[in-house]
Image (cartoon, rainbow, N blue to C red):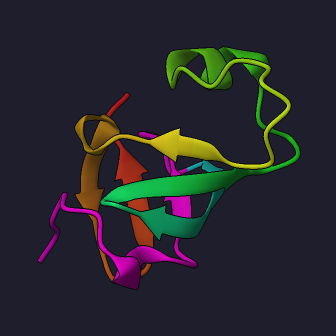
Amino acid sequence: MATTQITDDDEGKKVVDQTGDEVGIVSEVRHGTAHVDPSPGITDKVKSKLGWGDTGEDTYPLQEEMVDSITDDEVRLSQ
């Protein structure tokens, strides 16, 4: 069963967009927010959609409202 609440158990899961393309991996969960290490090939368009500007950060926060579902293997984005 898919959920949308982000927990520590989600660390290490791949993050995919609506079409199933991998956009990164959950590297850490802090205070209910997943921090995603983006895939090297992720486009600026996808980063912009997720509010991940060019901050020079290694990871980017992923708010729960951006998540469509979470399974045993992946976090699927709603955008």
Residue 27 horizontal/vertical position (percent): 63, 68
Quadrant of the rendered image containing residue 78: top left
**Quarter of the image where one finds residue 55:** top right
Q: Is residue 49 above or below residue 67?
A: above
In the rendered view, does 52 fall on the left or right side of 15? right
Quadrant of the frame with the N terminus: bottom left
Q: Residue at x 61, y 53 (%)?
A: 36
Across and down, in percent, residue 44 comes to 76, 18
Identity of the residue drawn at 30% across and 73% down: 7
The image shows residue 54 at horizontal and vertical percentages of: 79, 20
Dominant secondary structure of the magenta stretch? loop
Q: How many marks?
A: 0
Q: Nearer the viewer, residue 39 or 65?
A: 65
Q: Is residue 57 left or right of residue 26?
A: right
Residue at figure coordinates x 52%, y 17% from the top left: 49
| Residue 14 shown in magenta | yes
Residue displayed at 60% across by 48% down? 21
54 and 4: which is toward the camera:
54
Find residue 11 and report its horizontal and vertical position in percent: 50, 77
Can you say whether 77 is above or below 13 in the image? above
Q: Where 69 falls versus 73 (above or below)?
A: above
Quadrant of the drawing holding the C terminus: top left
Q: Which residues are magenta?
A: 1-20
- Displayed quadrant of residue 41: top right
